[in-house]
Amino acid sequence: MAESSVNLLLEKLGGIFQNEVHLLGVLLGGVQEEAINLRGEFERMRAFLRTADALQETDQEVKVWVKQVRDIAHEAEDILDEFTLLHEHDHGDGIYGSLCRLSCCIKNAKACYRIACQLKAINSRVKSISEVHKRLQHKFIKAEEGLGFDSVGNTWQDRRGDALLLDKSDLVGIHEPKNQLVGWLFKDNSGRKVVSLAGMGGIGKTTLAKQVYDDPQVEKHFEVRAWVTVNRSIKSGDLLKDMVQQLFKASRRRVPEVIANMDNNQLKATIKELLQERRYLIVLDDVWHLYEWDTIQHALPNNSCGSRVMLTTRNAEIASTTRTLSDGKTFELKPIPPIESWDLFCRKVFQLNKCPPHLEDICKDILKKCEGLPLAIVTISSVLATKDERRMDEWDMVARSLGAEIEGNDKLKYLKKVLLLSFNDLPYFLKSCFLYLSIFPEGHLIERMRLIRLWVAEGLIEAKEGRTPEEVADDYLHELLNRSLIQVARITSDGRIRTCRIHEFLREIIISKSRDQNFTTIVKEKSVPAHWSDKIRRLSIQSTLQNVKPNRSVSQLRSLFMFGVAQKLSIPTLFPKGFRLLNVLDLRSSPLKKFPVEVVDLYFLKYLSLRKTKVKTVPRFIGKLQNLETLDLKQSYVIELPVEILKLQRLRHLLVCRYQFISNEYFDVKNGFKVTPKIGGLRALQKLCFIEVNQDGGTIIRELGKLNQLRRLGLIKLRKVDGKALSSSIAKLSNLRALSITSVEADEIIDLQHLSSPPLLLQRLYMTGRLEALPHWIPSLPNLVRLSLKWSRLRDDPLIYLRHIPNLVLLELCRAFTGDRLCLKADGFMKLKILSLDKLDELRCIDVEMGAMDSLEKLSIQRCKLLENVPSGIEHLHKLKVLEFSDLPVDLMKTIRPDGKDNWRVSHVPEVSSTYWT
């Protein structure tokens, strides 16, 4: 990922002199001249780095050259940042400020001279590296002509064909998926449809597709069948020729010699002629990009014979696109369940025998790391099958050092190659983002927004016009999800990604790559190195630090993370020489009681997290962190911020609050924080949660209207008298996506009836407090996805007014209605999936009209003490999957479950798969 390092350096070279060169003049002439030369050299090298990044996977000479470029880019970046530190002081304005700046420059003349000499030495080394590039240029040209890195040098043999030769005894969990896919192929004899099999590498897509392809019923149903293997480096012409040859053979005809000389259009015409009036099945195995499908699809006639195309892909976007365009189907392969995984594992390791009792715990630990990935299970089994069953230490070694096994064991090389294919196919900027996941410990669930903010702080996100870095980063995350490199771990009730994770084998591979490329250094309790390199860029400490010795130099360190640190933390003891160039300091959940004073010297710090620590106060020197973008103090004991916070003009995310969780669906904000009345000066803020607004006579509320970049705003302790001012401010927040408002007391009225122009991009609205009436503007929100009303105590049925919100997915009503009847009208809530009714104390009946809530999947009714019966017309909710009744009247529960069984559910709502009664 040298290109990412070079891009970051060039960005700094472009901006470092903008504010200083006019003042420094001759004094900094040497630095400026060397920096200009450096910029030119790196711009020339950047043109070849993308090709080199791919070639280094198979060419050791190119790999060494890329490493040299990356290392020298890091050194140059550090030198430039040291130069910036010389001039970062706040000198004031006017003539006095200019004199102070001039005085500072004179004092720093010696240091500037030293930096100029360092840059000159860097330039000399860069020129030497450029000479090496000239010797390698023939390789770059060869690759750029289309041979691809899979063709340069003798690369590994693609063993995907082995999946086509598997014995049926090696297949587990394949019967049901196969039958479902065969059914899809036979159903509907209309136009050509595409059936896609999607999933990560090694999960069995090719194996399943081959079982379907060879099924006797399938063979009999289709007149013509062809299996075409696609690979990343294949040219479109070769792909079409392969298909033509297979179609001729399938028709038992000799392949004409003229085929070899046909262009793409002629080949497509030939394919169309061969298939025009025939029912065909074409399998495209291992499609990587949409252009590969585009190359083929126009050659396949869209006849009315019931023809099918079945493709396998690691990219969910390809599967989704082809399904949409052809009205087809997508089958997403899932990991093998634990019982079947254990069965396959034992068959492969112990040759149909049972696992010896003394090895069972170790084997289950190893199998757990495979996470149901068939290729991983089979491959690791081949390693273990050669181990002596009497030597527990050999088996334990595999369990404890999986990464070393993947790197050093020849039997695992194929698994590594298969998994690395997806990594190698990434563009350079996504490679850096994916490698970044190596900082997290094994089994760690990675919070989506935490990862996005970290990527932005690290400079891994490329700027796109009209979009914030966070929005671009979110696109990056979804692209990695689509490519099956990361998996969704948890989603919110309204469908947003909350946490993600990475497969353990992939994690071990990127840890190795991160170490090899000096991207991340990981310290674990049992593997603390005797010496750390002073050139490490990111340090992830996943240890209790009992064995870590001080006096370590980390002068080039840019990011520091601590996970699972249990004892008292002392940064000066660990790093007595400091780390002045730090960008990211993440001390989440560390045993900190005081704000670390060492932070005062971290001018370049962009991300600071003290979440879940015992820190109580933020010192005034926080104002010196001029580059800070994220300050995360959630679940700390901070309740007030100093006025110096206003100096942080680049601050984008300010998170200060303590939550008190009541259930999986609801939380209450126990404490927010007090802010300066001039909070409107932080114009870059995107997220501000949760601030106390019952102070300063409404000044803070009026200031909020100046924060026009806000995406999320959380307010607590709102008073009725401030409603008009808040309405005025909210109307100015056109970018707002999420708004949370809690009144100062349960009986305090939230008065937002004055809001005439609500933010139309608003997606999530949480209101906790009394409402005299439902705000008139809520039903007009076109993008509202989630609405939560608590303690509203509305007299009129809110469902009547809310039912036409077009995109509402989740509606929560807790103590929100004082009437005795709710009515779910026909043609309302067309996209609603979850409805939660809680503590509606006067509610006696619920009516569901036919055609109401056509998309509802979950209905939760809790603590409604007077409810007389289950909702009338509940059988009309045809898509209902989960029905939850909790703490309802005893007589009602007896009516529903007279014998303690779900007979009522079976007779009334048989579609429901899960029922909860408490």
Image: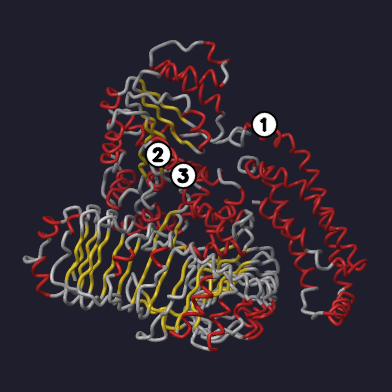
Q: Which residue is mark 1?
A: 145
Tell me: residue 449, above or below residue 247. below
CA neighbours of label 1 inside 10 A, class few (<14), some (14 to 19), many (20+)? few
Tell me: residue 769, above or below residue 277. below
Under mark 2, the amino acid is Arg
Name the side, left or right, on which 257 lies relative to 580.
Answer: left
Which of the pair 329/487 is nearer the observer?
329
Tell me: residue 117, above or below residue 389. below
- Tell me which corner region of the image, top left, top right, bottom left or bottom right, holds residue 184: top left
Mark nearest the camera among 3 and 2 is: 2
Q: Earlier in the sequence, mark 3 or mark 2?
A: 3
Under mark 1, the amino acid is Glu
Which of the pair 394/20 is nearer the observer?
20
Under mark 3, the amino acid is Glu
Location of residue 91 in the rendering, given as x and y in whole percent from the top left corner: 80, 80
Q: Which residue is mark 3?
A: 317
- Of helix, strand and loop, which one carries label 3? helix
* Marker disc for residue 323: 2
Whole-number angstrom distance, CA of label 2 to CA of label 1: 33 Å
- Of helix, strand and loop, which one carries label 2? helix
Which of the pair 459/861 is nearer the observer?
861
In the picture as drawn, the residue positioned furthest to the left comes out as 899
**Image quarter (top left, top right, bottom left or bottom right) of the C terminus:** bottom left
Can residue 443 be seen here? The reply is no
CA neighbours of label 3 inside 10 A, class few (<14), some (14 to 19), many (20+)? some
Name the side, left or right, on which 753 lies relative to 889.
Answer: right
Q: Earlier in the sequence, mark 2 or mark 1?
A: 1
Looking at the image, which residue is at 70% across and 35% down? 139
Whether label 3 touches label 1, CB < 8 Å: no
